[in-house]
């Protein structure tokens, strides 16, 4: 069986699983959101990380059904923790192909309504590993989602192709600083210069800023001092099933 056929089966047979990693408000230390990170529970090869299959998903034309599965599961899980009185946002990674593909906003609106989840509890993380073919299509897709009240985030910021013009014009509410700048920031003045500048840029544009790859309390503290809003990383938790995050709330300062 080729990888593409296997992937189609994986989606149909529910072999995919979502792990979640906390996103923490740096001023309070409270978990305010979780990022959904997909894994594939492969019947022969065990639990596979996204790096083992995401390229194949993108190239095989299954990114539509794949992302639909992730969105359905993430919104369903969000409804389940809301039932327990937990008000986390949930962040889902979407590819540029999903965004400019057909009717993502309609699909998302139907899902949120079905599960009674408020639109502002869902964040879509957009990774721009390649420039989208059509800026107009991108702008109207993002506008339609923003109109619903869904939040959008630019993932891996600083490693992709987002222009200042796009940052200014797209109704994106969060900038997510790539972990390559964050993990070793205290030992690297260039990383610190980049992070400080992105935090200032986000503030000036009225956007939220999240640093990913926060591994230690001293980086957490430095980010808080320079006014970064949120953090994500091993400092709080690796990605785990959401029920484990309820059992072990994020460690405090
Ligand atoms: O969990 P891990 O660190 O192995 O994730 C590696 C990469 O895979 C991350 O950069 C993330 O953006 C991507 N990824 C994880 N889950 C999903 C998903 O559900 N959809 C998409 N499109 N990408 C994902
Ligand atoms: O979509 P994104 O690239 O942001 O996905 C997060 C990825 O980063 C996941 O693969 C996760 O396992 C990884 N990750 C999460 N926290 C940390 C961290 O503190 N340090 C490092 N090196 N990787 C992390
Ligand atoms: Mn992400
Ligand atoms: Na990232």
Image: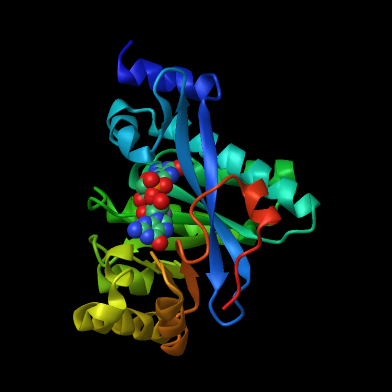
Residue at 47% across, 66% down: 235
The residue positioned farthest toward the top in the image shown: 1
Where residue 6 sits, quadrant-wise, is top left
Say if residue 246 shows up in the picture. Answer: yes
Residue at 46% across, 18% down: 43
Q: Is residue 85 above or below residue 251?
A: above
Find ligand 2 in the image and state its quadrant. bottom left
- Between residue 198 and residue 149, name the one nearer to us: 198
Where residue 183 sits, quadrant-wise, is bottom left
Residue at 50% across, 78% down: 229
Residue at 22% across, 79% down: 188
Where residue 40 sits, quadrant-wise, is top left
Q: As drawn, is 84 to the left or to the right of 164?
A: right
Q: As drawn, is 42 to the left or to the right of 163?
A: right
The residue positioned farthest toward the bottom in the image shown: 225
Q: Quadrant of the C terminus?
A: bottom right
Q: As drawn, is 244 to the left or to the right of 129?
A: right
Q: As drawn, is 51 to the left or to the right of 236?
A: left
Q: Position of residue 10 (x, y in %)?
A: 47, 22
Q: Position of residue 197 (x, y in %)?
A: 29, 84
């Amino acid at each position: 069986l080729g990888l593409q056929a296997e992937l189609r089966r994986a989606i149909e047979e529910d072999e995919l699983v979502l792990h979640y990693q906390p996103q923490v408000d740096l001023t309070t230390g409270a978990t305010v959101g979780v990022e959904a990170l997909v894994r594939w529970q492969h019947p022969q090869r065990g639990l596979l990380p996204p790096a083992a299959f995401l390229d194949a998903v993108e190239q095989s034309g299954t990114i539509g059904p794949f992302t639909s599965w992730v969105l359905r599961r993430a919104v369903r899980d969000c409804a389940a923790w809301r039932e327990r009185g937990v008000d986390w946002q949930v962040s889902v990674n979407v590819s540029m192909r999903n965004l400019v593909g057909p009717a993502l906003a309609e699909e998302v609106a139907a899902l949120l309504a079905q599960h009674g989840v408020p639109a502002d509890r869902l964040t879509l993380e957009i990774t721009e590993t390649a420039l989208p073919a059509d800026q107009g299509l991108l702008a109207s897709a993002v506008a339609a989602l923003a109109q619903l009240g869904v939040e959008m985030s630019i993932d891996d910021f600083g490693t992709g192709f987002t222009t200042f013009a796009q940052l200014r014009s797209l109704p994106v509410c969060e900038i997510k600083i790539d972990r390559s700048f964050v993990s070793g920031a205290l030992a690297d003045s260039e990383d610190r210069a980049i992070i400080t500048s992105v935090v200032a840029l986000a503030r000036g544009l009225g956007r939220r800023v999240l640093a990913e790859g926060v591994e230690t309390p001293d980086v957490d503290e430095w980010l808080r001092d320079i006014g970064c809003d949120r953090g994500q990383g091993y400092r709080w938790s690796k990605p785990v099933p959401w029920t484990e995050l309820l059992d072990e709330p994020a460690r405090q300062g």
